[in-house]
């Protein structure tokens, strides 16, 4: 009876957003805020008891690795993780915006139900504006030239400072990522067109400039491969046979009942005979490469190698689909009968490549193949893993831009611009809005102010080195001033260009400090300015990811503000 | 125990958990006050125990009155007075609902469940889903199907805002395609439940291998057989294979060669819903595949993968089955908890609608009786009109099979039945433990004594029923109601997921049945016009406590005019308790001011004009409210009869003999 403990009653706490929870929230927000942006600081996650040490500034790793104590934080983290699992970008944005909204709302002394309704209306207003035709912080992705796509890739790669890349290396890697992505888009779009795949092969120890994009797949070198085999094959088209069953001669899952074997029978020999028969068929049909997802029997392997057939086994299921897509082979699932002739695939060439200390077999497909490998190099394991995450995020962002060919201006400019738009929209002609929401004018203004301040503080949090963020009073973009500037100079002498790179300073611009009260402006830059400036210096963010992040942040903040009780099961 | 009552009630009506607790607490408080006042006045016993015993006796006395209260007072009030204030949801004869009426009732429901941020969006989506599933006709018959299979008809997606929820055509299987070959247009589908590849030896048998050649040829035969099967399927234009188990690699390989898409490891419930909607049965054994005919294959309109959140699922379009056009609803939410809440709110909304579409019959019994859900065969010779009425009984006793037979009648009106479903039950008296049989002499041409019954035993669930007593019959006669009806109440027991099997038999009794003063239940067919229902199908009232205000007003009136003191006390007790619900609705900033304003206005309206004017626009179901009140009354009675609680450390065994009895 001592093993049984009485069940503890659940902990019930009323009004969860107490002072100490707000304290925890602000600590959480500070952690995330300090990682935000290309100048962000890194975080080292380690457990005293051992285990992997991670250095990161990306939200996926942070939120996964850091255990959270309070249910409110867990709710916010779960919401952000779900967003990241689909869109892979703007996770930090969503988390910081959610925290800031909650904190700012706590400082207002209003009933949370009316604040939630107002936030919801403001969210709808923002989404409508961002989706409308005349939104000035939206850039159309031009697929005729690579500049906007390159800007998108560069922004993502540069926003992860844990990769420790210099400016030139960052440029180079983003161009490689873009090249790999463009390779996956098929040249001719038939009825069954689909995007190819980029397989990332991480190589540790080299400098980042060694990163390369190779068409086709890179597989582990099979051991004891006679080089003469490869030289023999290099000249012509190579037939490939792909098997996805185990060719090691085991009968593991073939029978439901029992199989009784009399002493004259040896099942391994029987199966080996069948395997060798298949091998002979492959040799007679001049197959140059046999790829198996699982293990190949060593006798079969040796026989095939003597017959100058290259055998690659233990490929793993991850590479099977790109291999099938690349060679056009059908993966065969039985060696009992003869392989039908339409199951063979084609490869153009085979060669051995070496990166650093690793040697890999390079399978080179025909011209139009949409499968490519991105060999990522970086100096050590930490920076390499962070770079891998950044490259995967960049590829996802580029893919998302295929569905919605727009990008939002980065560098804090979209947030500042949106805040100034909302402020200007909500000052006048809002009687019908007020009657819809059933709140007073003051309440509405307070809530609008809180919402806009959250957006502005998000833009301000890109600055980590003690500088200052300014907003210009004609377009509503964010400008930054370095910390070491002399105190008595004018703003216009200190700034150069805005955060996203769209605007350079010119005479008619005027600035105010971001976060202070500034005179309301009607932001509406003429879009004709866009063609003049060179877009490859832009900083661009992914449109669908940011919109979803904005929605998720506001909805989760609304949900948390609406909580009245928390009931925790402590068993 | 209270939690059990509440969840039982919620699984019937889909709503009202919070109102249940409010009403229950108000009733118990009122009871406590009543009893305290009673014993304080006449404490003949000075010892503590004696006073407690007296108090419990008083309580029991009052709760006994509560039981008769329901049949004698509540039903009368509802029938005579409250029915004048209701509006009807349906237009025309055929029980169809228009869009705006549906929207007003769903919006009221979702406001109470989700909060006013998303309620408009979700209520519009619920209406849209209802109309899409019923092919824009708005009938109530498809509601059974929706409620029963809601688990398979919805998909919950995390990581998106709630506003991205939408409705998809066809059925969404919650698995991805293992092999996908693109097809356009109509296709045939085969459903299997066992692996197609024959194993080397079946389970429980032994294969004796005597030579290597035997092993090789067995393997070759297996491979050839799989190839033959898949080629056969290809020739019969089967383009999709649905399997509830994992198929072997060889099957997938040949399927890819033949251009057949495969979905594996589908849950049994989903597969059975698919088979039901497509009108086929799954193939029982793979040996039969080569002998399949066209009737064993389903016809699908399209099949394609769909990306929901971070997962890919298979979407299969099916043709309409009867009135039901298959559609699936995709509910999104930023976190799984919120998504689950939306899902259960959606499900509850449809359960509530199902409840609204049924009328509630008059119940005149006192003791609960247990019935069994029955479904008679539809192709019986004699059709009986069915009505459905529900009432929940708190005690979860075992189900006793009941059979109902028809009996003779004198001036029975010849039925002109219209509805199709037929059922009958035999109600057995639980307390007496005997099965009541009827006079077998049936001289009615319209009814057959040999009503075929399919008695379907269900698991223990909610039981409901009531019985007629001879006293009530006399009272009925005394009150001189025209259609003196004496109905046996048979219920389908409802389990949350399995929906409700509606069956009840309406019985008509005429005035010469005064000699039947024993506990007889007779069944007969009835015409539709002569059936006396308590609450018509589709009765709705405005939200915001109209039901409670009206009931309070009429109960007070009744208490004034009534002569018996017990009836007076119970009426005033219940009247005060029901006001607790609107008090909490209008509770802003913990003051009663708004509630008192509304209350005074409503009272003045009723007294001066006889109806509530300027009420809220949204509607709620009256049968749900009535059901709630009845459930709470029964819960109170069972709570009050508990005398002592005996706590035990170990788990009670599941057999009935081992249970400890703590009801006095």
Image: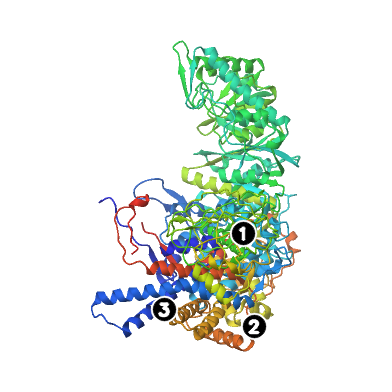
Distance Cα–Cα, label 2 vs label 1:
42 Å
Query: Upstream in the sequence, badge 2 or badge 1?
Result: 1
Mark 2 in CB contact with mark 1 (< 8 angstroms): no
Q: Nearer the viewer, mark 2 or mark 1?
A: 1
Indicate whether A247 appears above or below A135: above
Q: Is residue A114 in view from this perspective?
A: no
Which residue is denoted by mark 3 in the rendering? B30
Give residue B524's mark: 1
Distance Cα–Cα, label 1 vs label 3:
42 Å
Q: B236 or A116: nearer the eye?
A: B236
Which residue is denoted by mark 2 in the rendering? B613
Q: How many marks?
A: 3
For mark 3, name the chain.
B
For mark 1, name the chain.
B
For the point 64% across and 72% down, which residue is it? A422
Query: Upstream in the sequence, badge 1 or badge 3?
Result: 3
Query: Upstream in the sequence, badge 3 or badge 2?
Result: 3
For mark 2, name the chain.
B
């Amino acid at each position: 009876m001592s093993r049984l403990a009485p069940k503890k009653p659940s902990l019930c706490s009323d009004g969860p957003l107490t002072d100490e929870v707000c304290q925890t929230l602000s600590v959480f927000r500070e952690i995330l805020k300090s990682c935000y942006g290309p100048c962000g600081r890194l975080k080292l996650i380690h457990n005293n008891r051992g285990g992997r040490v991670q250095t990161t500034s990306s939200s996926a790793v942070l939120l996964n690795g850091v255990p959270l104590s309070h249910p409110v934080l867990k709710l916010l983290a779960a919401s952000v993780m779900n967003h990241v699992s689909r869109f892979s970008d703007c996770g930090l944005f969503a988390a910081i915006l959610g925290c800031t909204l909650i904190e700012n709302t706590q400082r207002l002394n209003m009933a949370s139900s009316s604040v939630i309704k107002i936030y919801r209306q403001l969210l709808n207003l923002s989404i409508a504006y961002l989706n409308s035709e005349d939104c000035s912080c939206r850039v159309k992705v031009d697929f005729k030239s690579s500049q906007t796509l390159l800007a998108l890739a560069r922004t993502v790669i540069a926003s992860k400072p844990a990769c420790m890349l210099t400016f030139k290396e960052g440029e180079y890697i983003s161009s490689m990522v873009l090249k790999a992505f463009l390779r996956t888009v098929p040249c001719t779009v038939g009825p069954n067109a689909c995007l190819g795949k980029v397989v990332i092969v991480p190589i540790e120890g080299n400098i980042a400039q060694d990163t390369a994009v190779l068409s086709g797949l890179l597989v582990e070198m099979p051991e004891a491969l006679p080089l003469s085999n490869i030289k023999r094959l290099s000249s012509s088209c190579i037939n490939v046979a792909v098997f996805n069953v185990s060719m090691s001669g085991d009968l593991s899952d073939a029978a439901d009942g029992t199989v009784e074997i009399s002493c004259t029978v040896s099942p391994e020999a029987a199966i080996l005979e069948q395997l060798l028969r298949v091998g002979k068929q492959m040799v007679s049909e001049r197959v140059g490469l046999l790829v198996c997802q699982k293990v190949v029997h060593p006798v079969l392997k040796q026989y095939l190698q003597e017959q100058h057939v290259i055998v690659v086994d233990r490929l793993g299921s991850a590479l099977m689909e790109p291999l099938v897509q690349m060679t056009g082979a059908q993966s065969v699932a039985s060696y009992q009968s003869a392989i039908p002739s339409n199951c063979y695939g084609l490869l153009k060439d085979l060669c051995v490549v070496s990166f650093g200390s690793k040697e890999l077999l390079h399978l080179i497909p025909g011209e139009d193949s949409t499968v490519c490998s991105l060999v990522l190099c970086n100096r050590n394991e930490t920076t390499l893993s962070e770079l891998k995450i950044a490259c995967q995020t960049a590829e996802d962002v580029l893919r998302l831009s295929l569905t919605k060919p727009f990008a939002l201006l980065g560098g804090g400019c979209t947030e500042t611009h949106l805040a100034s738009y909302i402020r200007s929209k909500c000052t006048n002609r809002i009687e019908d809005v007020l009657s819809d929401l059933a709140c007073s004018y003051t309440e509405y203004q307070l809530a609008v102010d809180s919402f806009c301040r959250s957006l502005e503080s998000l833009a301000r949090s890109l600055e980590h080195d003690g500088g200052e963020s300014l907003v210009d009073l004609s377009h509503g973009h964010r400008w930054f001033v370095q910390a070491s500037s002399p105190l008595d100079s004018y703003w216009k002498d200190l700034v150069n260009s805005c955060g996203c790179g769209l605007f350079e300073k010119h005479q008619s611009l005027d600035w105010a400090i971001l976060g202070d009260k500034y005179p309301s402006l009607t932001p509406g830059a003429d879009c004709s300015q866009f063609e003049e400036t060179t877009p490859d210096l832009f900083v661009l963010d992914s449109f669908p990811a940011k919109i979803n992040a904005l929605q998720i942040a506001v909805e989760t903040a609304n949900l948390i503000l609406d909580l009245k009780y928390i009931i925790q099961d402590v068993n | 125990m209270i939690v059990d009552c509440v969840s039982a009630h919620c699984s019937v009506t889909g709503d009202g958990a919070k109102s249940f607790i409010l009403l229950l607490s108000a009733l118990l408080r009122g009871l406590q006050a009543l009893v305290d006042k009673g014993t304080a006045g006449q404490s003949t016993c000075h010892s503590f125990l004696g006073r407690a015993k007296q108090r419990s006796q008083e309580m029991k006395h009052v709760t006994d009155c509560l039981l008769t209260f329901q049949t004698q007072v509540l039903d009368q009030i509802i029938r005579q007075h409250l029915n004048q204030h209701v509006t009807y949801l349906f237009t025309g004869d055929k029980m169809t609902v228009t869009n705006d009426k549906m929207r007003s009732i769903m919006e009221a429901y979702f406001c109470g469940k989700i909060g006013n941020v998303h309620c408009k969006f979700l209520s519009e989506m619920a209406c849209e889903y209802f109309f899409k599933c019923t092919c824009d006709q708005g009938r109530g018959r498809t509601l059974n199907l929706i409620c029963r299979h809601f688990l398979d008809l919805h998909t919950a997606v995390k990581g998106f805002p709630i506003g991205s929820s939408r409705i998809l055509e066809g059925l969404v299987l919650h698995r991805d395609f293992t092999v996908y070959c693109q097809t356009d247009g109509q296709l045939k589908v085969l459903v299997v439940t066992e692996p197609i590849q024959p194993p080397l030896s079946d389970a429980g048998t032994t294969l004796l291998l005597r030579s290597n050649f035997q092993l090789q040829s067995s393997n070759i035969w297996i491979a050839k057989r799989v190839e033959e099967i898949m080629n056969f399927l290809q020739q019969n234009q089967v383009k999709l294979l649905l399997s509830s188990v994992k198929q072997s690699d060889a099957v997938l390989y040949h399927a890819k060669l033949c251009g057949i898409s495969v979905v594996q490891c589908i849950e049994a419930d989903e597969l059975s819903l698919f088979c039901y909607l497509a009108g086929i049965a799954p193939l029982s054994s793979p040996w039969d595949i080569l002998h399949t005919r066209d009737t064993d294959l389903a016809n699908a309109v399209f099949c394609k993968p769909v990306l929901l959140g971070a997962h890919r699922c298979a979407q299969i379009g099916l043709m309409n089955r009867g009135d039901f056009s298959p559609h699936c609803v995709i509910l999104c939410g930023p976190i799984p908890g919120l998504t689950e809440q939306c899902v259960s709110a959606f499900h509850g909304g449809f359960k509530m609608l199902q409840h609204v579409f049924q009328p509630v019959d008059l119940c005149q019994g006192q003791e609960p009786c247990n019935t069994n859900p029955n479904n008679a065969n539809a192709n019986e010779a004699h059709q009986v009109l069915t009505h459905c009425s529900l009432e929940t009984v708190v005690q979860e006793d075992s189900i006793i099979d009941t059979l109902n037979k028809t009996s003779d009648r004198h001036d029975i009106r010849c039925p002109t039945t219209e509805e199709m479903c037929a059922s009958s039950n035999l109600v057995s008296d639980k307390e007496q433990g005997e099965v009541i049989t009827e006079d077998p002499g049936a001289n009615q041409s319209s009814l057959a004594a040999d009503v075929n019954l399919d008695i379907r035993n269900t698991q223990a669930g909610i039981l409901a029923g009531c019985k007629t007593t001879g006293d009530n019959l006399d009272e009925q006669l005394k009150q001189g109601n025209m259609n003196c009806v004496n109905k046996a109440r048979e219920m389908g027991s409802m389990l949350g997921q399995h929906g409700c099997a509606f069956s009840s038999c309406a019985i008509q009794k005429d005035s010469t049945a005064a000699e039947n003063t024993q506990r007889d239940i007779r069944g007969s067919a009835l015409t539709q016009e002569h059936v006396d229902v308590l609450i018509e199908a589709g009765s709705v009232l405005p939200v915001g406590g109209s039901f409670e205000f009206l009931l309070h007003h009429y109960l007070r009136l009744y208490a004034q005019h009534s002569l018996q003191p017990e009836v007076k006390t119970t009426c005033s007790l219940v009247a005060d308790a029901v006001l607790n619900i609107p008090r909490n609705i209008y509770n802003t900033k913990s003051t009663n001011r708004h509630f008192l304003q509304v209350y005074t206005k409503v009272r003045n309206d009723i007294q001066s004009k006889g109806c509530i004017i300027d009420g809220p626009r949204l509607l709620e179901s009256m049968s749900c409210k009535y059901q709630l009140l009845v459930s709470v009354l029964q819960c109170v009675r069972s709570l009050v009869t508990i005398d002592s609680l005996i706590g035990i450390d170990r788990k009670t065994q599941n057999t009935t003999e081992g249970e400890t009895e703590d009801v006095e």
